[in-house]
Image (cartoon, grey):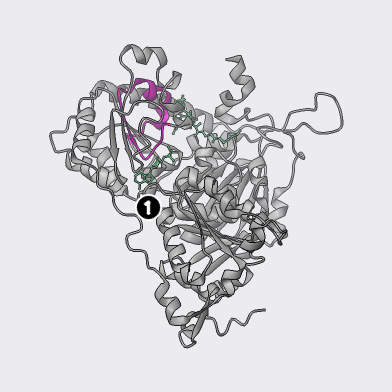
Amino acid sequence: MTDLSIKTDAQSQDHEATDGFQLVIDALKLNGIDTIFGLPGIPITDLTRRAQANGMRVISFRHEQNAGNAAAIAGFMTRKPGICLTVSAPGFLNGLTALANATTNCFPMILISGSSEREVVDLQQGDYEEMDQLAIARPLAKAAFRVLHAEDIGVGIARAIRAALSGRPGGVYLDLPAKLFAQSVDAEAGRSSLIEVVDPAPRQIPAHDAVQRALDLLRGAKRPLIILGKGAAYAQADADIRALVERSRIPYLPMSMAKGLLPDTHEQSAAAARSYVLPQADVVMLIGARLNWLLSHGKGKTWGGKQAKAWGGQRFIQVDISPQEADSNVRIDAPLVGDIGSCVAALLAGMDASWPRPPAQWLAAIAERKDKNIAKMTETLAQNPTPMNFHSALNVVRDIVRANPHAYLVNEGANALDFTRSIVDMYQPRKRLDVGTWGVMGIGMGFAVAAAVVSGEPVIAIEGDSAFGFSGMEVETICRYGLPVCVVIFNNNGVYRGTDLNPTGGSDPAPTAFVKGARYDKLMEAFGGVGVHATTPAQLRAAMEDAIRTRKPTLVNAMIDETAGTESGRITSLNPASAKKK
Ligand code: FYN
Ligand code: ADP
């Protein structure tokens, strides 16, 4: 094992030479980065050891994809790039899915991978884990860099930080060949080569005329609507966003990860009237939300189709830091380019006491739809069927989150995702962490570990049984670090549900069916955590309450009616077979 004793921060000052390992650590620390999510191995094992010896938190995972997802969500939570550290080729590729997902979701993250020797890779001479990683990462990342000389480490890390955080945030790849780490550099020269990045995410002040254009359009609206996306949550302009909504009195719709930016119980929330407000609104202000598939691209039936066209259709204001986002799907009548904090502040400054209240008829119509949907939901949640179904289980989760609004809620699956989103209210910003823009499965345990590590708060992970399988081995990580994570698996014996049969009558199970009655709880027990098998809401409630109180790693195997659940949850229409039928 490497001698760590001569390599700590303070001691290295007394020595004449430093090395690549130390400079990477010093550069990260200089920029306020104190945690690395990763998985040790050649050539970065000593980097993980020395980072820990230098006081960094090193969270070591069982698979790089989960470490990458952890880094990405840490970036979303903190507005500092989350760091994922991997070995070369296969480890790098495992981390790459998370990097691409981070870029897609606008999460700031840096994937740092060790790599094989350039000379050998470029001549394709068959090095250990040979791969041209930089070329592969480039199209999937916001930016990608390689450092060949130890004296360039400071610049490399500074560029990676700036690229991840400035403008629209995203994933950055940093390639560090094995040889770099051992390079020796004069300690003083090394120190002075490091860069403390000044203002890595500069404010972008919106133009005055663009603000005025947006205000004019909004003021004239008869049926205005605000849509808050995860960009608004990321911006951490919580007080101003709330003030904007409340001063304008405009109803708002939170996208999934913007839930809790204002409490979901806020009287202006139109979440429970989603399918009414989208086709009816005449002016829609998007704040940090893209008109992608999650908003049906701003057109078609969801937005009123021919009927809406007949009265002129929606007009859009889009507040976004990316100047290229506007018009990506439909015409944006008033693009407002800038950082959300500055844009919202400018909008607020233009809303004086004379700002008109939205027409009462619009507000009343929304309230009516909302009340009806909420009453229907309350009725459904009050039922207590045997076996337990998604609703009766989520009624418990809803109560637990209401009682613990500071807890994080990680959520993935199909039905487990969709039901949780509409049933479980969120009360604080950035507490709901989910599958995001790609609807990707596998974020669960990585997000849960990061949320607990970064915040120290309890984490509840509501997982479909299929979704959990992608990252389930990380329950060992949760136990190893003693994290206050309560995983609840909605176990209905399969993907979507557990009743599919092999149509040939052969002995292979259907592609969507799992082992019936699987005891996921035993998995947590295997590593010293608490496992609970719950078949009733009362058992689920007791287990979750204990988990929150004791902060012990817990996994509740919540058995759900195996006939419950629809194909792909609420996005059934995206299945090619369903699309053909339409
Ligand atoms: C919402 N709703 C409510 C409430 N909140 N009713 C009562 N009370 C409350 N608090 C209603 C809302 O009005 C909708 O009914 C319905 O619940 C669902 O609301 P949601 O979730 O906001 O809307 P919807 O249509 O599901 O949203 C579309 C979507 C969403 C595309 C944004 O489906 C989504 O984020 N999907 C991600 C799916 C995904 O990534 N899946 C992973 C892959 S699964 P109506 O108004 O009556 O419609 C692979 O198979
Ligand atoms: P959702 O899925 O919740 O609708 P999206 O990920 O589609 O959200 O959209 C987030 C948007 O927010 C992106 O277009 C991104 O450019 C923008 N964004 C991210 N951070 C900021 C910021 N600080 N200021 C302004 N816009 C931002």
The quarter of the picture where residue 411 lies is: top right
Q: Quadrant of the C terminus?
A: top right
Residue 403 in sight from this viewpoint: yes
Residue 116 falls left or right of residue 484:
right
Name which residue lies at 57% across and 70% down: 180
Residue 287 is inside the magenta segment: yes
Percent position (x, y) of residue 580?
61, 17
- The mark total stands at 1
Residue 560 falls left or right of residue 451:
right
The quarter of the picture where residue 570 lies is: top right
Callout 1: helix, strand or loop?
A: loop
Residue 475 in sight from this viewpoint: no
Residue 142 falls left or right of residue 580:
left
Residue receiving disc 1: 166
Name which residue lies at 46% across and 38% down: 256
Does any atom of ligand 2 lie closer than 8 Å to the CB of label 1? no
**Is 347 or 415 nearer to us in this picture?**
347
**In the picture shown, does residue 316 fall above or below 519?**
above
Name which residue lies at 64% across and 36% down: 388
**In the picture shown, does residue 107 fall above or below 178?**
above
**In the picture shown, does residue 127 fall above or below 358?**
below
Magenta-drawn segment: 267-291
Residue 318 is inside the magenta segment: no
**Is 134 or 69 nearer to us in this picture?**
134
Percent position (x, y) of residue 10?
46, 83
Going by the numbered disc 1, the residue's amino acid type is Ser
Q: Quadrant of the N terminus?
A: bottom right
**Residue lying furthest front:** 123
Percent position (x, y) of residue 470?
66, 46
